[in-house]
Amino acid sequence: MIFLADQNRELRIHLDIKNASISAHCDQVVALKKHFNHTIRCIGRPHNGNCVTYALQLLEQNERLCYALQKYQVRPGSEFVKWLLLQGRLQEVDCEIDGALALYFRHNCWRHVGLVSRRGRLVSKWGSYGVFDHQYSEVCSEYGDTLRFFAPINSAKAVEYFFEFGCGPLNLPAKEVESLAALLKSDREDDP
C-alpha cells in the first residue's frame, strides 16, 4: 500500500480536467508540463470504455457481452469493482509486480484502476478520456490518496466475473441468461 497524500498535490489538483474532448484532455495534460515537472504521456485515445474495461481488457475479450449487460444497467464500473473486492475475486499483494492491478481509493472507496507497467509507473485509462503512462502520484486528486496492489487476473476470467456480477442480482429470465451465456461462450470459441 502506498499513501499519496503529500505527493504532487498541486499537479493532482490541476489534473482534474472536466468537459473536454479526448484529444483536448490529452493536450491539456501535456500543457501542464509548463507549470509542473511531470512524466505523464498520453499513449492512446480510445473512444470507448473506462479504466475498468481497459485494465481488465473486458472490451477486447468480450465487447458484445459488455454491451448486452449494459442494456440491463450493468456497467463495468465502481459497483463491479466493489463486488470483485467483496467477493474476494481480487487478491491483494504486498508489493507491486509488472501487470498487477493498482487500485486507487479515496476515503476507503475505490475510485480508479491501472496496470503496473514497471516499478513506480502505471498505464491507465482516465475515465472516458485517453490512456496514460504515468507515475503513481501523477493522477487527479479525485482518485484518492491510497494505492493498493492486486494480483493480475487474465481477461477471460475478468469477463466471467463480469458475467457473474451482471447476471446474479438481476434475476433475469432463464432465456436472457442463456442468451448472455451464449455471447460469453461464442467469444471463447473465437479465441485461437
Image (tube, rainbow, N blue to C red):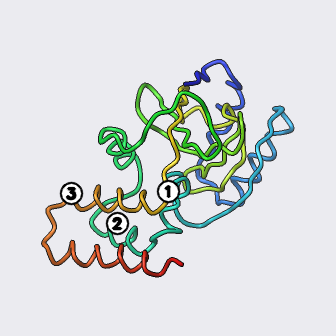
Distance between mark 1 and mark 2 Cα atoms: 22 Å
Residue 38 coordinates in the image, percent (x, y):
80, 36
- Measured from the top left, where is residue 154 in percent x and y? 50, 56
Q: CA distance from mark 3 to mark 1?
A: 21 Å
Q: Residue at x 69, y 50 (%)?
A: 132
Find disc 2 in the rendering and name its residue: 70
In which quadrant is the C terminus drawn?
A: bottom right
What residue is shown with label 1? Answer: 154
Q: Earlier in the sequence, mark 1 or mark 2?
A: 2
Mark nearest the camera among 3 and 1 is 1
Q: Are marks 1 and 2 in contact (CB under 8 Å)?
A: no
Left or right: where 49 falls relative to 117 = left
160 in relation to 105, above or below? below
From the viewer's perspective, is the residue at label 1 or at label 2 nearer? 1
Q: Is residue 41 above or below residue 105?
A: below
**Image check: 132 left or right of 113?**
right
The image shows residue 92, relative to residue 160, as above or below, that is: above
Disc 3 and disc 2 in contact, CB within 8 angstroms: no
Q: Amino acid at mark 2?
A: Gln
The tag on residue 168 is 3
Q: Circle 2: is it few (<14), some (14-19), or many (20+) Cα within 10 Å?
A: few
Q: Residue furthest right?
A: 34
Pointers 3 and 1 in contact (CB under 8 A)? no
Q: Amino acid at mark 1?
A: Asn
N-terminal-most mark, 3 or 1: 1
Q: Which mark is residue 73?
A: none
Q: Name the image quarter holding the N terminus.
A: top right
Earlier-in-chain disc, 3 versus 2? 2
| Residue in the picture at 70% in, 60% down | 44
